[in-house]
Image (cartoon, rainbow, N blue to C red):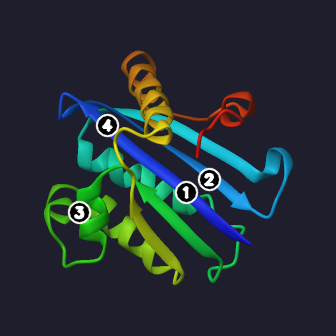
Amino acid sequence: MSIILWTTGLCRPDSGYGGYAFVRRIDGETGAAAIAGVAGGERRTSLARMALTGLIEALASLSDHPANVAVTLHLADPDLAAELVSPDGAYATAEPEAWAAARAAVAARPVLNLVPLAAHTPAAGFLNAWADFGRDTAKTRGGFKAAIPKPNLLKFPG
């Protein structure tokens, strides 16, 4: 078994209203349990916080899977992918609490392959649409987090 995660975060303007989304697919499983996803958003946030929140939420969704399961993580933010394997940089400075939580979540997964997600792929478009939904919902309701409906997830192009 292996697990593939895709994450994204956005914020317009930065700082302002933000959203994030992730999709998780478990290879080797079939049916509705094989794919899951979440979208959310916050007011008065930053792009760094939304990218880190998407990452944290995606890795937290693996809590019922052993730590040694192979995980491939596609990150829409190439700067975040680079910083996760280097000394603390801009994300650590901008969002120290979220950065510490993200680094701990990454460290808890010893078999983790970080892969940048190209911006113009169908998977990136799907994630951005849901992150935008999270951002828009946060504008009207405040902090928001909800599962992406299964019929939508079954259309995920990843």
Mark 3 Cα-neighbour bin, 10 Å: few <14, some 14–19, many ≥20: some
Task: Specify which label sits upstream in the sequence, 2 or 1.
Answer: 1
Q: Nearer the viewer, residue 11 or 143?
A: 11
Answer with the quarter of the image where residue 45 lies: top left
* CA distance separating discs 1 and 4: 17 Å
Q: Amino acid at mark 3?
A: Pro
Q: Quadrant of residue 61?
A: bottom right
* Cβ atoms at labels 2 and 1 below 8 Å apart: yes
Of marks 2 and 3, the one in the foreground: 2
Which mark identifies residue 5? Answer: 1
Query: Would you name the residue on which mark 4 appears?
Result: 10
Quadrant of the frame with the N terminus: bottom right
- As measured in the structure, the alpha-carbon distance from the residue carrying label 4 to the one carrying label 3 is 18 Å
Asked if the residues shown at circle 4 and circle 3 are in contact, with their CB atoms under 8 angstroms apart, the answer is: no
Residue 105 lies, in percent from the top left, at 46, 71
Q: Can residue 105 be seen in the rendering of this structure?
A: no
Is 156 placed left or right of 40 in the picture?
right
Which of the pair 148/146 is nearer the observer?
148
Spatial CA span between label 2 and label 4: 19 Å
Residue position for label 3? 96
Q: Amino acid at mark 1?
A: Leu
Q: Of marks 1 and 4, which one's residue comes earlier in the chain?
A: 1
Between circles 4 and 3, the one closer to the viewer is 4
* Residue at figure coordinates x 49%, y 36% from the top left: 122
Decide: is 56 above or below 37.
below
How far from the left and from the top, in percent, is residue 46? 23, 41
Give amino acid for label 4.
Answer: Leu
